[in-house]
Image: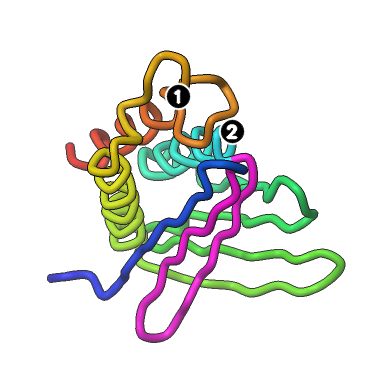
Amino acid sequence: MKSSLSCSVTIDLDDGDGEIIVSDKNQNLIISIGLAAITLRNFFSDLNALYTYKKTKFKLEHYGSADYYLFVRDSNVIRIEEVRKPGGRDIYKFNLMDFLFSFEQGFQKFFTKLKKDGVLPLDDGMDDFMYPVNKDVTDSFNSFSKNLKK
């Protein structure tokens, strides 16, 4: 059965801010990230741990604001709480596997476009720690993607 979820990824390669949009006919989750070089590496690792049951929940911080996202696995469902400071909370629920595969496909498209545009693979001089799609980020994504396809 084909998933009804879609995922799009936009990351500003100059400042590292970005948006990941996961949506279906009923929900539209917008995950805002800052410091992509740190956030994405940890995000892929945490999603991998959630998938393999090494974790049942994790918190994704939005660097630059007090907002955060709490990802909780409950059997085959992922619940994502978006918490905004000083107040506000939205809750999203997705089938876990649909969410993970949609997320992986969205990032595959993003990285494929960067390869097509000549941004990836990075030159040795570009692979510094704070570049939004540095080697640590792409390695973490590749590990997540590989585990998901086992």
Residue 22 location (% of width, % of height): 42, 67
Which callout, 2 or 1, points at the residue further toward the start of the chain?
2
Q: Quick one: 30 or 96, which is closer to the camera?
A: 30
**Which residue: 53% across, 49% down?**
12
Majority secondary structure in the magenta region? strand
Q: Is residue 59 left or right of residue 48?
A: right
Quarter of the picture holding the N terminus? bottom left
Which residues are the magenta region? 16-35
Residue 34: x and y in percent read: 64, 47
Say which of 9 and 124 sits in front: 124
The residue shown at (52%, 36%) is 132
Residue 38 got which mark?
A: 2
Q: Which residue appears farthest toward the right when viewing the image?
A: 86
Q: CA distance from mark 2 to mark 1?
A: 9 Å
Q: Secondary structure at mark 2?
A: helix
Position of residue 102 relative to residue 124, above or below, is below
Per the image, is 22 magenta? yes
Residue bearing mark 1: 136
The secondary element bearing badge 1 is classed as helix
Instruction: Please tell me which residue lies in front, 46 or 63.
Output: 63
Location of residue 105 in the rendering, given as x and y in whole percent from the top left corner: 26, 54
Q: Please state which amino acid type lies under the numbered disc 2.
A: Ile
Q: Amino acid at mark 1?
A: Asp
